[in-house]
Structure formats: structure tokens, C-alpha cells
Image (cartoon, helix red, strand yellow):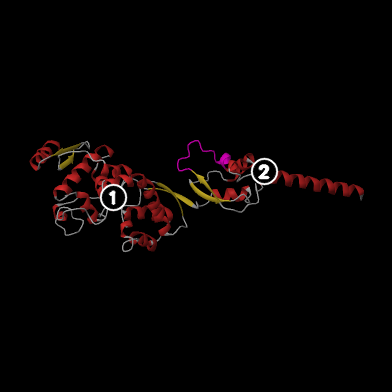
Amino acid sequence: MHKILIILSVVLLTILAISVYISGLFGPPGESKDSIVFIIPEKEVDFDLTQELFNQKLIKNPKGFKFLLDNFTPGVEIKPGGYRLSQSMNAWVVLRKITGKEDLKWVTISFCPRKEQVGEKLASILGWDEDKLNEWNTLYKDEKSEYFEGVYYPDTYLIPVDESVSQVAQRFIDRFNEKFTPLSGKFMEKNIKWTTGLKIASLIAREAAGPQDMKIISGIIWNRLDTGMRLQIDATMQYTLGKNADGSWWGNIDLAQKQKDSPYNSYLYKGLPPTPICSPNIDAIEAVIDPTETECLFYLHDESGNIHCAVTYAQHMINIKKYL
């Protein structure tokens, strides 16, 4: 009987020791259940997943977690994004979370997109249904119409998949405000309303071949506005045209389209369009208040993307024959 008790004690102590050892490897690093967003960068250059989890006190033992990662998730893709974790989770739960669906997803919006383009990208990545996409496309159409178009700043965002449409929109608007605020004083000095500046910036962005010719285009647009000349900018008509049959948003404009009655038709009507036609970046916005001084009223881009401007329409026709 005495020997049996000794053996049982040894077994229990062994089990306890193994339990403590396993807990040291795979147990939760703390007791807090507060949610921590663990971010895996979109571009994972030199990103050590295990070490970063340990640094943020989300795993107890890097070697233990690496063992689980190597032996229980072979070939499983761990996607960039945000994952809601807590220090009360053990290594198994953490592993299951980061090999599952992202709680926050990376969304990159580039160039100068119109609102519907941004919506399509968001719907695709965040899994929006048709109702949510329609809510996005009509948001601020009637109320706060100054936020309907132009303020969805092109950048990279980490967006919670469970966030409402209006919350996502506010993220973009906040980023726009962050970028625009340092320039607001200069706009006030030149007596340019921010809504007016944004309209011009959107035209510049869609017409420029790159940042290198934004200021000259800005100067030409200001010249046309100052002289009462119609802007005659194809991009405004591309905006009116909407989505093309091939799924693109910025297609070619034919002569018939230039005769279409629309408040965005800068061939028929003088002045700026009712809203911006896209959401410009900071380069185009800065070009509005820092235009190149020029006498030019016309411009074109050659096949290499170089800009050529002209003071008169006759000179512009010469440029067309020469460069196009």
C-alpha cells in the first residue's frame, strides 16, 4: 500500500510538472480580457510574427508558439490585417485567431477615385452586400453634400470588417482633414473656399500625367476661370458618363457626349462642376494654391506623357498636329 501511494505521488507530481511546463509554453500570458488589435503589416518585410506577439505580451513563450505554428498550421496562409486578441488567450486560441479571418482588413485606395470606385473596392474587401454598397454611394447626397464626393482620401487604411458604412466613410474624411488642415490657412489667405479648392484639385488630378505637371495645369485652369472661358475638360464628362461597358469608370469621350446636357458638362457650361469629380491627393490640392504663372489657356499631353501648352487656340492646333 505504501509503495502504491509513493507511485501515485510520483505520477501526480509528474503530471503537475508536465502541466506547469505546458502552461509555461502554451498558457495565457496574463489575465486581462481587454481586446488588443494585433497588426500584421500589409508588406511583411522583416516582420517576425512570433517575436512581435511575444513583445506585445500576447503569447507566453516564443519557442512554444513557434512549435505550434510549424507543426499544426503547415501551409496555412496567415493574412496581413488586424486580429483582436487578449492576454487571457492561450497559444492555441491565438493560433486559431491569426490563421482565421481578419478582424480588420487592409484597403488601399490609389490615385484620384470617384466615390463609387472606392465603394466597389470596400465592398470587395470588406464583404459588403448590395444594400451597404448603395448606402455608401448615396451617403451625404442630400445632407452634408460637401462630403458627398472628393473627401475620400486615397491612402492605405486598416478597416474593421464589422464597422458601419458611415464609420468607414468617417475614416476617409478624417484622413482628408488630417492632410488638408495644414493648408487651410493658405486657402484662407487666398480667399479660396475649401470646397472650391477641392473641385479644382480633382480636375488637376484627373488631367495631370503626374505631379510634375499639376502646377501648370492648375495655372491654366485658373486662367480659364478668370477669363470666363469654359473649362472644356474631358474628365468632367467622364464623370458624367459613369461606368463603361467594360467596367472601367474613366473611358474615352466622343463628340456626342460633349453635347450631353449635364451640370458637369464643362463644354456647355462655364465655371466649376457642382462637386469634385474624384478624391485628389495632397499634390493636387497643393497645386491649387501654388499654380505655375502662365499665359497658356490650352494644353495637351504627347504619347510620352509630356505636357505642351499654348496661349492661343491656333498655337494649340499646331501642338495637336506636332505631338498627336
Residue under pointer 1: 198
Q: Residue furthest front?
A: 189
Q: Is residue 104 magenta?
A: no
Query: Residue, x 28% and y 50% (percent of image)?
Result: 198
Of 152 and 2, the residue lying toward us? 152
Q: Can residue 316 be seen from the camera position used here?
A: yes
What amino acid is at disc 2?
Leu
Considering the whole magenta stretch, tell me its main secondary structure: loop
Residue under pointer 2: 25
What amino acid is at disc 1?
Leu
Q: Residue furthest right?
A: 2
Q: Can residue 324 be seen from the camera position used here?
A: no
Task: Give the number of callouts.
Answer: 2
Q: Quadrant of residue 132?
A: bottom left
Query: Residue, x 90% and y 47% (percent of image)?
Result: 3
Badge 1 marks a residue whose secondary structure is: helix
- Horizontal placement of 274 versus 122: left or right? left
User: Distance between the Cα atoms at labels 1 and 2?
Assistant: 56 Å
Q: Is residue 50 magenta?
A: yes
The stretch of residues the image draws in magenta is 41-52
- Horizontal placement of 88 versus 224: left or right? right
Badge 2 marks a residue whose secondary structure is: helix
Instruction: Please tell me which of labels 1 and 2 falls first in the chain.
Output: 2
